[in-house]
Image (cartoon, rainbow, N blue to C red):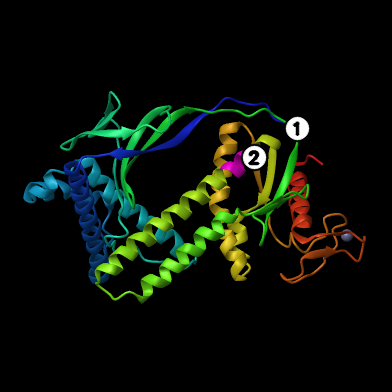
C-alpha cells in the first residue's frame, strides 16, 4: 500500500448571501448584462463563421471590451474581469464544441442563453472587484453584502462567483492550498458496480440502496412538471408553478449531492483502493436500457465526488475497462451471456451462483488488481 501524503488542493466553498433589495437588484443587473454580452459574442462568432468562414477568437473579443464599456455606460458599471470571464466561458463552450466535432461525437453548437439558463458571474481574481472584509463580501460598485457563514472558509480564495438560485443569491469561493484531510488506511480494497435498483453493489456483496426520499422528491417533481404543462402559457398561475418546479429541482439536486458525499466518505473510510468501471469507455459501450442510463447519469456525479474526496483523503480510485464485466464469471473467467433482465449469474463452467451486480463488482476488483499487479 502506498504512503499517505498530506496534499493540498483546490476546493470550492459556497455560502448563502443576505443582500439588501438594492444589492439584489444590482447583481441581477450585472447578470443581465453578462447574458447579453454572452449572446452577442456568440452571435458575432456565428456570423463571422457563417458569412466568411472566419474564426473569431476570445482575445479578439476581449479587445473590444474597452470600446463597449466606453460607448455603453451600462457596461462601464460591470467590473472588467467579470466581462472577460463571460467571454472566457463562451470560448470554453466553443472549445468543447470543437473537441466534440473532432472526436466524432454529437457536436451540439453553443446555445444562446435565455434568462432561465444564465445564473452566475465570476470575478476571476480574488481581491480585484470582490474580496472579504470582516466577514462581509465586498463587491466593487455594489458594496458590503452579508454572508451566511455555514462553514469555515479554508485555503486561499482565488476566484469569486455570484450565483442566483431559486431561493436567492449565493457566493462561491474557489480556494487553492486547501489542506487535505487524510483518512486512516485500512488495508482493504473493493470494487463497485452501478446497480439498476440499488445505487451500487460492492465486491463484498454490500448493497447501497438509493434513498427513498429520492423517489419521493422525484415523483413530486414529475407531478409539478405535469401541472406546469397544463397551465396556460403566459398566465400568472404558470409562473407560480414554474417557480415551484425550479425549487423542487434544486431540492432534488441538493439531496442527491448530499447523498453522494455521504456515500463517498463511507467507502473511503472502509477502503484504501476502490475499483470502478472506466466511465469514458463505459459511455461508448453504453447500454441503451432507460433505467440503466438514468442511473448512469447520477453515477457520473458520484464518480467525480469520489475521485475528489479520495485525492483529499490520500486514498485511491482506479478505473478499469468495463467491457463485459457483467458477462464474465468472476471466479473462473468463463463468458456467461445474459440479458439485463437476468438478475443472477449462474456459471455453467464452475458452478458459481451470485447476484449479477455482485459478480460484476468482484470482476471489476479483479481486473483492477491485475491491472495494478497486486495479485
Ligand atoms: Zn465460473
- On screen, residue 251 above or below 108: above
Looking at the image, which is closer to me, 221 or 199? 221
Which image quarter: residue 140? top left
The residue at which mark 2 appears reads as: 266
Q: Which residue is drawn at 77% across and 55% down?
A: 358
- Marks 2 and 1 sit apart, C-alpha to C-alpha, by 15 Å
Question: Which numbered dot is residue 89?
Answer: none
Tell me which secondary structure the magenta stretch mostly adopts.
Answer: helix
Image position of 2 with respect to 67: above or below: above
Mark 1 Cβ and ligand 1 under 8 Å apart: no
Label 2 Cα neighbours within 10 Å, binned few <14 / some 14-19 / many ≥20: few
Q: Nearer the viewer, mark 2 or mark 1?
A: 2
| Residue at position x 73%, y 31% in the image | 186
At 42% from the left and 37% from the top, the residue drawn is 12
The N terminus - image quarter? top right
The picture quadrant for ligand 1 comes to: bottom right
Q: Where is residue 19 in the image (x, y as percent from the top left)?
A: 24, 39
Q: Indicate the secondary structure of the residue bearing disc 2.
A: helix
Q: Residue 345: x and y, percent?
A: 82, 63
Q: In this rendering, would 281 be left or right of 42?
A: right
Residue 6 is left or right of residue 136, and the answer is right
- Per the image, label 1 sits on a secondary structure element best described as loop
Q: Quadrant of the C terminus?
A: top right
Q: Magenta part of the protein: which range?
A: 262-266
Residue 89, x across and y down, in percent: 32, 51
Q: Is residue 272 visible?
A: no
Q: Does the magenta stretch include residue 209?
A: no
Q: Are marks 2 and 1 in contact (CB under 8 Å)?
A: no
Local packing at callout 1 (Cα closer than 10 Å; few below 14, some 14-19, many 20+) is: few
Residue on which disc 1 sits: 187
Amino acid at each position: 500500500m502506498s504512503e499517505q501524503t498530506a496534499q493540498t488542493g483546490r476546493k470550492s466553498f459556497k455560502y448563502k448571501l443576505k443582500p439588501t433589495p438594492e444589492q439584489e437588484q444590482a447583481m441581477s443587473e450585472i447578470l443581465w448584462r453578462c447574458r447579453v454580452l454572452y449572446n452577442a459574442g456568440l452571435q458575432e462568432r456565428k456570423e463571422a463563421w457563417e458569412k466568411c468562414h472566419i474564426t473569431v477568437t476570445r482575445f479578439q473579443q476581449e479587445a473590444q471590451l474597452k470600446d463597449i464599456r466606453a460607448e455603453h455606460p451600462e457596461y462601464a458599471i460591470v467590473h472588467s474581469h467579470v466581462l472577460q470571464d463571460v467571454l472566457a466561458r463562451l470560448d470554453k463552450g466553443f472549445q468543447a464544441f470543437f473537441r466534440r466535432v473532432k472526436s466524432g461525437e454529437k457536436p451540439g453548437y453553443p446555445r444562446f442563453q435565455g434568462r432561465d439558463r444564465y445564473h452566475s458571474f465570476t470575478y476571476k481574481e480574488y481581491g480585484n472587484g470582490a474580496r472579504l472584509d470582516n466577514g462581509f463580501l465586498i463587491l466593487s460598485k455594489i458594496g458590503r453584502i452579508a454572508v451566511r457563514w455555514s462553514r469555515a472558509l479554508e485555503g486561499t480564495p482565488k476566484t469569486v462567483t455570484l450565483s442566483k438560485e431559486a431561493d436567492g443569491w449565493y457566493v462561491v469561493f474557489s480556494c487553492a492550498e486547501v489542506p487535505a484531510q487524510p483518512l486512516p488506511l485500512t488495508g482493504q480494497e473493493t470494487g463497485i458496480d452501478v446497480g439498476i435498483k440499488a445505487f451500487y453493489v460492492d465486491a463484498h456483496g454490500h448493497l447501497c440502496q438509493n434513498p427513498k426520499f429520492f423517489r419521493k422528491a422525484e415523483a413530486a417533481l414529475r407531478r409539478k412538471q405535469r401541472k406546469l404543462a397544463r397551465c396556460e402559457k403566459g398566465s400568472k398561475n404558470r409562473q407560480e408553478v414554474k417557480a415551484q418546479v425550479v425549487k423542487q429541482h434544486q431540492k432534488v439536486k441538493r439531496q442527491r449531492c448530499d447523498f453522494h458525499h455521504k456515500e463517498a466518505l463511507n467507502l473511503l473510510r472502509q477502503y484504501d483502493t476502490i475499483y470502478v468501471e472506466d466511465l469514458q469507455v463505459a459511455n461508448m459501450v453504453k447500454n441503451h436500457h432507460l433505467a440503466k442510463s438514468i442511473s448512469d447519469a447520477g453515477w457520473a456525479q458520484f464518480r467525480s465526488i469520489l475521485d475528489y474526496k479520495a485525492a483529499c483523503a490520500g486514498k485511491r480510485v482506479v478505473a478499469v475497462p468495463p467491457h463485459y464485466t457483467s458477462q464474465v464469471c468472476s471466479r473462473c473467467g468463463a463468458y456467461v451471456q445474459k440479458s439485463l433482465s437476468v438478475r443472477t449469474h449462474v456459471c455453467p463452467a464452475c458452478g458459481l451462483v451470485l447476484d449479477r451486480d455482485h459478480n460484476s463488482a468482484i470482476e471489476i476488483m479483479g481486473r483492477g488488481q491485475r491491472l495494478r499487479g497486486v495479485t
